[in-house]
Amino acid sequence: MQERRRRLARAKFALPSFVTLLSIACGFASIVISVDNAAVGDPHDYRLAAILLVLAGVFDALDGFVARATNTQSEFGVQLDSIADVMNFGCAPGLLLYCYGYAQMAAAHPTLVRMGGLACFVFVACGALRLARFNVQVGRTDPRYFVGMPITAGAACVASVVVAWPDPLFTPVQGFLLMALMIAVGTLMVSTLRFPSSKQPKNAKLLVALAVCVVLLALLRTRFFALFFVFYVSATLLLNIAWRGGWRGIAPPRVIED
């Protein structure tokens, strides 16, 4: 009986890591589909690769929930989760956007393709830096706000473009716009702008906002996600500007002296 309990305890501690591995599987599947589809340019496969990143984000949120629910938080789980985030929300979306945006232009615009690859690398590098900073700032910042855009939100932001417009890019103008998007989102991740977290106090306004999102999702479908991130980033920028101007209608982050 005692041996059985030990086995159950070990299995319980393995459960959050198993969920994290499911997240890694989704990220890896997205990479495989992106690479296989680079020469073909099938819009449905690009959209599938982007959706897999969203699914990876769902599992990423679930592993923490499972760990807290079963009281099996561990340093091993924290490190595994961080490594998974670099691949799922850094490398996988960077590669997806490179294949989606530049694979079809390789013959006609080789220089533009190299520039696009560099922009995608900037996104990946900024995501890795963002995660490293987050890991060393745990407990030293106001939990109601993230310092910089979370890497999961950054990945979802660029992936939403593929979900909304899955046809691969063909023109140089589109290529430059995609470069600007990748660099802008990367910059937001390593910035010191405060982005609201899920630990904000819940109230009736949040429920109204959620209802509006559901209605817009039903009306706009795949285009909703791109619109959501335009609003998310714009509202965050305006909020940070308002705080600097002295506005306190929404409480700014607490400064922790450490």
Image (cartoon, helix red, strand yellow):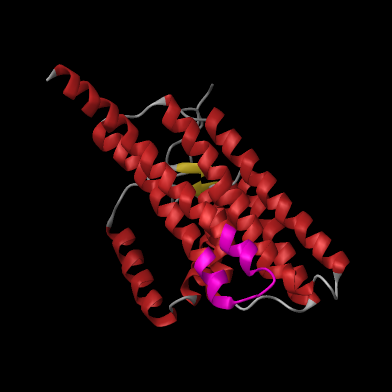
Q: Nearer the viewer, residue 185 or 67?
A: 67
Residue 220: x, y in percent?
44, 80
Q: Is there any visible trace of residue 233 in the rendered image?
A: no
Q: Which residues are magenta?
A: 32-49
- Judged from this view, the residue extending furthest toward the right is 111
Residue 118: x, y in percent?
78, 55
Describe residue 244's horizontal placement relative to residue 221 as left or right.
Answer: right
Q: Nearer the viewer, residue 145 or 179?
A: 179
Q: Quadrant of the C terminus?
A: top right
- Judged from this view, the residue extending furthest toward the top is 2
Q: Is there any visible trace of residue 67 in the rendered image?
A: yes
What residue is shown at x 62% (from left), y 45% (from top)? 127
What residue is shown at x 44% (from left), y 49% (from top)? 23
Describe residue 51's horizontal placement relative to residue 115 as left or right.
Answer: left
- Judged from this view, the residue extending furthest toward the left is 1
What residue is shown at x 72% (from left), y 51% (from top)? 121
Say which quarter of the image contains residue 203.
bottom left
In the depicted structure, whether residue 16 falls above or below residue 25: above
Q: Quadrant of the N terminus?
A: top left
Say which quarter of the image contains residue 233.
bottom right
Number of marks present in the image shown: 0
In the depicted structure, whether residue 64 falls above or below residue 73: below
In the depicted structure, whether residue 171 falls above or below residue 53: below
Residue 212: x, y in percent?
35, 71
- Judged from this view, the residue extending furthest toward the bottom is 219
Assess whether residue 235 is covered by the magenta stretch.
no
Q: Nearer the viewer, residue 172 or 6?
A: 6
Assess whether residue 40 is covered by the magenta stretch.
yes
Q: Main secondary structure of the magenta part?
A: helix
Describe residue 183's horizontal placement relative to residue 71 as left or right.
Answer: right
Say which quarter of the image contains residue 32.
bottom right
